[in-house]
Amino acid sequence: MPTFEIGEQDFLLDGRPLQIVSGALHYFRVHPDQWADRIRKARLMGLNTIETYVAWNFHSPTKGEFRTAGRYDLGRFLDLVAAEGLHAIVRPGPYICAEWDGGGLPAWLFATPGVGVRRAEPQFLEAIGGYYADVLPILAERQVTRGGPVLAVQVENEYGAYGDDSPEERASYLRALVDLTRAQGIEVPLFTCDQANDEHLARGGLPELLRTATFGSRSAERLATLRRHQPWGPLACMEFWDGWFDSWGLHHHTTPPEANALDLDDLLAAGASVNVYMFHGGTNFGLTNGANDKGTYLPITTSYDYDAPLAEHGVVTPKYLAMRDVISRHRTVPDELPAPAPSAPEAELVLDRRVPLADLLPLLGEPRRTERLPTHDELGQWSGFTLYGTSVMPDDGVVTFADVRDRAWVALDGEPVGVLGRTEHVRTLPLPRRQGELTLLVEDEGRVNYGRRIGEAKGLVGPARTATRELTGWTSVPLAFDGSDGLLDPRVAEAVRGGVLPPPSPRAVRGSAAGRRGDPGTASPSGTVADDAPFAGPVLCLGVLETEPGADHFLRLDGWTRGLVWVNGFPLGRFRAAGPTATLYVPGPVVRERNEVVVLEVQGAAAPVVRFVAGPDLGPTEA
């Protein structure tokens, strides 16, 4: 059987030196019917290896569940890597960062009292052991030592940047992960990775594990830093940053292809191995985006294009060609280039069905009654939206919360009062001086994926106070839009499609912020709507698009404010008027000849019209 080892200066595959030239490609950010295409284009750029994270919470959205079919079939993804003649590096965490919701750590894990976060706490390690027992056998049977593509497995991720545990406590945690990994049959080399500075490299590894570094420039200097902490073995940049991620409300990040190419050339000329992060970024479909909070909470956009060599929709970019040229100076590159992609079909679509969110509450969740204000986590709502309600009196005058995570649309008896927002640090609103039902539609905009706020609860954080008292007597409805495998619940689509609505639930929150059936200006759920009239949310809208099946599409929602989109039940993700991203990518495998487009608009839109355009618009750049 083949062998893969860490030599004195090189990686050794069957005893011969191997310079790894890898690219990051996250299977969970790509439609599974497009995995083979993206892997093939990696080979055509000259790569010999594919690297992927594994997102624990992607496979285990609820406790006791581990999904492995369809979009979750990591084994099939690795088999496709092998079929293309490439090697694989896998980084299963448990923490991955990756601008992914919660850094890949499941939210349900932190609902356990006293559980640790990235440390050798028994409950945390027990949960990791269960996760490893599910995921690592998939890797074990595909190790290079057993004829598969997997060369190496990472332990934790950029651990040197996290926490203030003692060196002994940190080593204890990492060694526990090593033991759990080896116990599942992983025999290939293990490694750690940290940012290329002395503090992180010193704190994040173990003497017996290969240290690798992450950086995006000044390659010679960064490699020298790594060598100070890794005196033996090959040098490797496990994340060569060739772009950057985007956050809602900011500009679209780009980096010059020429600068990336020069730094990559320096890396390869030094004999170092490299993993280009990202080779292909893909998309944060559904509610999977993470967020950063370094004083200001900033959720990550749906597009994870990353200004990578292969664009979000799988198209070759100038950066791809520049990097391919550099790689060709150091190893043989295939003569073939990927074919250019055609323009996407264009169309304008009226979403002529509309149902207020309030009318769908019986389908979306069961009301929960509590005296004190619960968080999303206390309700078992690990992502998405929750509708909260309670009664207020004329002398209350104002409402304030200890924290709002992350945005809340507030209404009194169905009439909008205002918006609370974590990014804006707004957690207090004046109230009309009358008695009524106060409701708040609260969105978890993505769990923090980096830093000290990993593992925090979402939703409204109490106490909730007015000018005169603490608000109690809450009714909360966690809203579940998805059915099996993360697709839109077909009952919801049917209700919006045909106006076939369930009877109102007597237990539903009264005076919902989602509006009331029969409110003035609300269209009949079963009727068509004017194609030029503005409307208020929260509502679900539906339209049918006839187009070219199997073709990539790009959806623009100009005039809409914020919400979610599904095409044929597939969750494209979030949209926001704030940008920078102006289009949502619709993968070709999702598209049929006749397509149902469903939009949840939580605030309001200028008209119930969307457009499909010829190509992506990722927004303005800083320049």
Image (cartoon, rainbow, N blue to C red):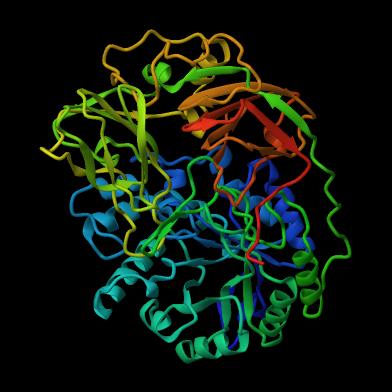
Percent position of residue 483, x then y: 47, 27
x, y percent for residue 65: 39, 39
| Residue 94 at x, y percent in the picture | 40, 58
Count of labels in the image: 0
Above or below — where is 93 with respect to 21?
A: above
Residue at 64% in and 80% down: 15
Q: Nearer the viewer, residue 533 or 225?
A: 533
**Relative image position of residue 412 (x, y in whole percent):** 30, 26
Of 22 and 185, which appears nearest the observer? 22
**The quadrant where residue 516 appears:** top left
Q: Residue at x 50, y 34 (%)?
A: 486
Q: Quadrant of residue 345?
A: top right
Q: Quadrant of the C terminus?
A: bottom right
Q: In this rendering, would 118 be left or right of 325?
A: left
Which residue sits at x=49%, y=26%? 536
Is residue 394 depicted above or below 425 in this figure?
Answer: above
Relative horizontal placement of residue 145, taking residue 95 as reference (left or right):
right
Residue sitting at the far left:
469
Q: In the displayed structure, would residue 375 be above or below residue 10?
A: above
Q: Nearer the viewer, residue 105 or 617?
A: 617
Q: Is residue 156 above or below residue 354?
A: below
At 77% from the left and 60% from the top, the residue drawn is 317
Q: Is residue 124 left or right of residue 31?
A: left
Q: Is residue 409 visible?
A: no
Asked whether residue 514 is in view, the answer is: yes
